[in-house]
């Protein structure tokens, strides 16, 4: 977690092995997740507790998660803050006849702890097709 690429690698590892302990290390205490509800026409947000509960549910209810990080579209990094926009592909296998494919982009804000040097995600704006 001491590099931004390490955050993405740990994120992929957490999804592959459905490991909420690793995932929880990536998410800051003041984390906010936001996605656009196109049916309702507004953005929906939640905090860290809801993110962990939602991710735990995804991990528990899927047989397999295949996450592939693609190109970084935008990267702005200074000494303690970063904003990364990156595309991804995610296949969620609930069972052999129920596979959902999500393609999109994450827009992540990250902050580095000056003492531990670990990067954590503070904000995630989901730009996926789901």
Image (cartoon, grey):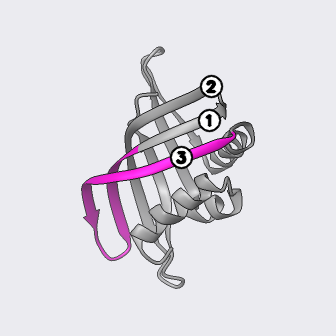
Who is closer to the viewer here, 55 or 83?
A: 55
Q: Secondary structure at mark 2?
A: strand
Residue 64 shown left or right of residue 101 in the figure: right
Who is closer to the viewer here, 64 or 49?
A: 64
Q: Do labels 1 and 3 touch, CB within 8 Å? A: yes
Distance of label 1 from label 3 (alpha carbons): 8 Å
N-term-proximal mark, 1 vs 3: 3
Residue 21 x, y percent position in the rendering: 70, 62
Residue 72 x, y percent position in the rendering: 28, 55
Residue 86 x, y percent position in the rendering: 33, 50
Q: Please determine whether, in this image, residue 104 is positioned above or below residue 56.
A: above
Assess whether residue 68 is covered by the magenta stretch. Answer: yes
Q: Which mark is residue 93?
A: 1
Q: Which mark is residue 98?
A: 2
Q: Which residues are magenta?
A: 63-88
Q: Which mark is residue 30?
A: none
Distance of label 3 from label 2 (alpha carbons): 14 Å
N-term-proximal mark, 3 vs 2: 3
Q: Please determine whether, in this image, residue 94 is positioned above or below residue 60.
A: above
Crowd tier of the residue under label 2, counting other residues whose Cα lies within 10 Å: few below 14, some 14–19, many 20 or above: few
* Residue indicated by mark 3: 66
């Amino acid at each position: 977690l001491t590099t931004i690429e390490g955050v993405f690698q740990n994120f992929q590892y957490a999804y592959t092995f459905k490991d909420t302990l690793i995932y929880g290390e990536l998410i800051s205490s003041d984390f906010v997740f936001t996605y656009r509800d196109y049916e309702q026409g507004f953005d929906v947000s939640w905090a860290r507790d809801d993110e962990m509960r939602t991710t735990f549910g995804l991990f528990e209810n899927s047989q397999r998660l295949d996450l592939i990080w693609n190109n970084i579209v935008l990267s702005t990094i200074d000494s303690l803050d970063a904003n990364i926009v990156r595309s991804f592909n995610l296949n969620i296998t609930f069972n052999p006849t129920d596979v959902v494919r999500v393609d999109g982009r994450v827009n992540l804000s990250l902050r580095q702890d000056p003492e531990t040097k670990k990067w954590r995600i503070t904000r995630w704006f989901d730009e996926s097709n789901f």
